[in-house]
Structures are given as structure tokens and as C-alpha cells.
Amino acid sequence: MRTAPFDTYPYIKNLETKGGFNEAQAESILEAINGAQTALFSGVATKNDIAQLTNTISQLATKAELADLRNELTKMGTNISDAKSELKGWMFTGFIAIAGLMATLHFIH
């Protein structure tokens, strides 16, 4: 995060006149304060950082929803496979029943 620039001249003069510092000392103090301020605020999130994080979180929620959908589709695939197996069983039973009926009718005539 960038800090807003400010005019240090009045602060330097104040340190000289009221604090008893010479100009070099006053400048050094303000440089130290400016460095500390920069270090302190360097880890603060900007509005852009928060917007990017919000976007990332919303995409993660979408990924979670997709994972749920994938699980549901997998369950549906299993149900379809079970239904196919059951249908094959019924078809085989029906085929045997029809074959038996045809054999019975053939021997009756």
C-alpha cells in the first residue's frame, strides 16, 4: 500500500525550533518515521486485494458446487447401471418364459 506524500518541511522546522535538533537530525527522524509507516502499512490489504480475494472465494464456491454435481452424476450413473442390470435380468426371464411358451405351444399342436 502506498502512503500519501506529505510536506516534511514544517515537521523538520518544528523539530529544529522546538526539539533542539539540527536539520540533518530532523531529516533523519522524519525518514525513520516514513520508513516505519511504509513498513507498517505494507501488509494492509487494498480494495483491489479484497476484490481479488472475493472473486477467488466465489470461484471456490463454484468449484464446490461442481464437485457436488459430479457426485450426484456419479450416483445417477450407478443407479442407471443398476437399472440396466435389473432390466437385463427381466429380459432374460421374459425370453425364457416366451421360449417355454413357444415350446409348449409347439408340442400341443
Image (cartoon, helix red, strand yellow):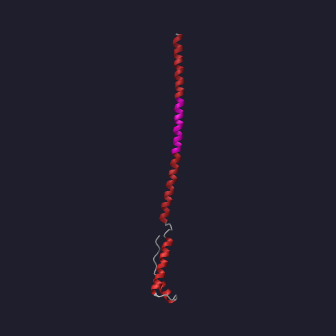
Q: Nearer the viewer, residue 32 or 67?
A: 32
Q: In this rendering, is residue 26 above or below 67?
A: below
Q: In this rendering, is residue 109 above or below 29?
A: above
Report which quarter residue 9 is drawn in. Answer: bottom left
Instruction: Tell me, yes or no, whether the highlighted magenta stretch contains residue 84.
Output: yes
Q: How many marks are shown on the rendered structure?
A: 0
Q: In this rendering, is residue 85 above or below 68?
A: above
Residue 89: percent from left, percent from top? 54, 27
For the stretch drawn in magenta, the main secondary structure is helix
Residue 29: percent from left, percent from top? 48, 81
Residue pictured at 54% horizontal, 17% vertical? 101
Q: What range is drawn magenta here?
A: 70-87
Q: In this rendering, is residue 56 above or below 31?
A: above
Residue pictured at 54% horizontal, 24% vertical? 93
Residue pictured at 51% horizontal, 56% vertical? 58
Q: Nearer the viewer, residue 29 or 3?
A: 29
Residue 46: percent from left, percent from top? 49, 67
